[in-house]
Amino acid sequence: MVDVIIAIGSILALLIGWISIQQLSRQYAARHPEFGPAREEGGGCGTSCLCSNGKCSKKQSIPDIKLPEDLPHDLPK
């Protein structure tokens, strides 16, 4: 029974800690608007816009990467 109480207490402590960290992040963002709003987990696009639902309003183009087969083959060895 003690193990169950310890497990429940640990989970509650982790959740309260995570909520506290989120609140501190929001307060810091409010005090420092030059850094932009606090980014919430799952709250929007990152740098490459790999959203889970595929519907992003801020899609950014990813630059083309040249693969070795795309490079000229007449380079000196």
Image (cartoon, helix red, strand yellow):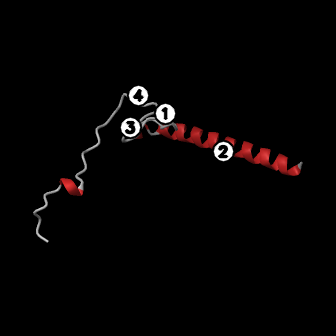
Judged from this view, the residue extending furthest toward the right is 1
Q: Residue 33 versus residue 63: which sits nearer the camera?
A: 63
Q: Residue at x 41, y 28 (%)?
A: 55
Q: Mark 1: which amino acid?
A: Gly
* Mark number displayed over residue 49: 3
Q: Earlier in the sequence, mark 2 or mark 1?
A: 2
Q: Residue at x 13, y 61 (%)?
A: 73
Q: Quadrant of the C terminus?
A: bottom left
The residue that label 2 is drawn on is 17
Mark 2 to mark 3: distance in Å? 29 Å
The residue that label 1 is drawn on is 43
Q: Which one is in front in this view, the residue at disc 2 or the one at disc 1?
A: 1
Q: Are marks 3 and 4 in contact (CB under 8 Å)?
A: no
Judged from this view, the residue extending furthest toward the bottom is 77
Q: Mark 2: which amino acid?
A: Gly
Q: Residues within 10 Å of mark 3 (few under 14, many from 20)?
A: some
Image coordinates for residue 59, horizontal then vertical, percent: 34, 33
Q: Earlier in the sequence, mark 2 or mark 3?
A: 2
Q: Are marks 1 and 4 in contact (CB under 8 Å)?
A: no
Mark 2 to mark 1: distance in Å? 20 Å
Q: Earlier in the sequence, mark 1 or mark 4?
A: 1
Q: Which one is in front in this view, the residue at disc 1 or the one at disc 4?
A: 4
Image coordinates for residue 12, horizontal then vertical, percent: 73, 42
Quick one: SS at disc 3? Answer: loop
Quick one: SS at disc 2? Answer: helix
Q: Which one is in front in this view, the residue at disc 2 or the one at disc 3?
A: 3
Relative height, residue 10 to residue 50 (above, below): below
The residue that label 4 is drawn on is 55
